[in-house]
Image: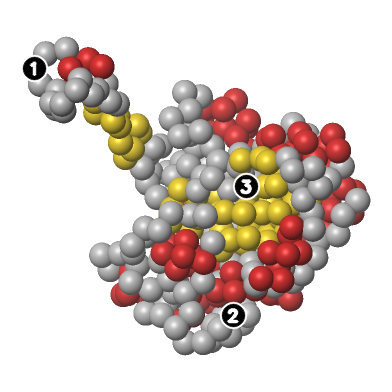
């Protein structure tokens, strides 16, 4: 049987809800507006032991970095080291000062990162209805800068989908829904509350490291799958930020309609939900499995990159 044609996002999401205008015509941080001072204080209530987990992938990990096709992993280059002063070429400073310098060459959407709300779009408009032409030469609207200026702090909740499904790692193209997230939370003895930062573990990094470059044959990550109900649940729950350990936070190609990344469009572009990708959730997940505490203070400070469509970040989960 012939597959039906892949719908245009403008048709698929014609009746999908939006939060455009909810925070005024000039808003650039979307659902992060839900993270008020009260949400910071609600998050702090979940700090019980003073245990800190950092959620960033190691830049330059010798095991290799997963990246979206067409991007390259971040590269660190040594510029100055002790060998720089072997000859007469090193910079001369009085008193015998030597030092090491290096730089990174990185896609802002590579490694652990925040996506700006203007990072994806369809139909010629980005978050809040801004014209997509405002992205030319850099995001002049909805860049990562205002997100970085605000900072992201609230109550985080880990949803360990791999553990919930009794697997070391979810499979390529394996999907789950918001109902699965709620069932996972219940099995963990917690409830997803309004305005929680959702932190979802698939253990994709293990899958990627097991498969290496073969992962890109039939490229399709595990993740959330689009449905109208899921989008409305995110809107009703006022979810500010979705954090996962995968490249794209959702199943790459929707098995129901064939589109690529429809949740980027429905959640980020339409609802203003900020996405955080390729987080390393392993130490947090191991700790939560041991002590049964799946909620924590979530704090992340993306870098203030002028016009940037994303930024590397090292989020903290503090229990
Ligand atoms: C794309 O938007 C293409 O990728 P990501 O959000 O995963 O960086």
Q: Tell me which corner region of the image, top left, top right, bottom left or bottom right, holds residue 203.
A: top right
| Cα distance between the residues tagged 1 and 2 | 62 Å
Q: Say which residue appears at 62% left-offset and 47% top-offset.
A: 316
Going from the N terminus, do you reach mark 1 or mark 3 first? 1
Q: Which mark is residue 88?
A: 1
Q: Tell me which corner region of the image, top left, top right, bottom left or bottom right, holds residue 279.
A: top right
At mark 1, the secondary structure is: loop
| Tags 1 and 2 touching, CB below 8 Å | no
One can see residue 188 in this view: yes
Q: Which mark is residue 316?
A: 3
Residue for badge 2 = 18
Disc 3 versus disc 2: nearer the observer:
3
Residue 264 drawn above or below residue 311 = below
Other residues around mark 2 within 10 Å, as few (<14) / some (14–19) / many (≥20): many
Q: Say which residue appears at 45% left-offset and 68% top-offset.
A: 146
Where's the N terminus, which quadrant?
A: bottom right
Front residue (pair 22, 148): 148
């Amino acid at each position: 049987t012939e597959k039906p044609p892949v719908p245009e996002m403008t048709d698929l999401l014609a009746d999908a809800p939006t939060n455009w205008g909810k925070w005024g015509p000039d808003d650039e941080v979307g659902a992060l507006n839900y993270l008020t001072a009260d949400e910071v204080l609600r998050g702090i209530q979940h700090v019980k032991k003073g245990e800190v987990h950092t959620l960033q992938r190691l830049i330059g990990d010798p095991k290799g970095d997963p990246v979206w096709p067409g991007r390259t992993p971040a590269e660190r280059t040594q510029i100055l080291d002790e060998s720089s002063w072997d000859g007469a070429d090193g910079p001369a400073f009085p008193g015998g000062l030597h030092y090491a310098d290096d730089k990174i060459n990185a896609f802002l959407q590579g490694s652990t990162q925040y996506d700006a709300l203007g990072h994806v779009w369809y139909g010629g408009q980005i978050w809040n209805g801004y014209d997509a032409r405002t992205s030319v030469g850099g995001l002049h609207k909805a860049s990562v800068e205002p997100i970085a200026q605000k900072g992201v702090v609230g109550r985080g909740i880990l949803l360990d989908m791999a553990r919930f499904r009794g697997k070391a790692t979810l499979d390529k193209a394996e999907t789950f829904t918001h109902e699965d997230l709620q069932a996972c939370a219940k099995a963990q003895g917690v409830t997803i509350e309004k305005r929680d930062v959702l932190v979802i573990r698939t253990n994709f990094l293990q899958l990627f490291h097991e498969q290496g470059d073969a992962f890109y044959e039939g490229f399709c990550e595990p993740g959330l799958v689009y449905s109208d109900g899921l989008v409305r649940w995110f809107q009703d729950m006022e979810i500010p930020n979705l954090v996962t350990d995968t490249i794209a936070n959702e199943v790459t190609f929707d098995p129901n309609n064939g589109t690529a990344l429809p949740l980027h469009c429905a959640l980020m572009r339409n609802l203003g939900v900020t996405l955080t990708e390729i987080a390393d959730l392993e130490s947090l997940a191991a700790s939560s499995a041991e002590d049964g505490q799946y909620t924590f203070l979530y704090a992340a400070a993306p870098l203030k990159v002028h016009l940037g469509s994303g930024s590397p970040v090292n989020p903290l989960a503090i229990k």
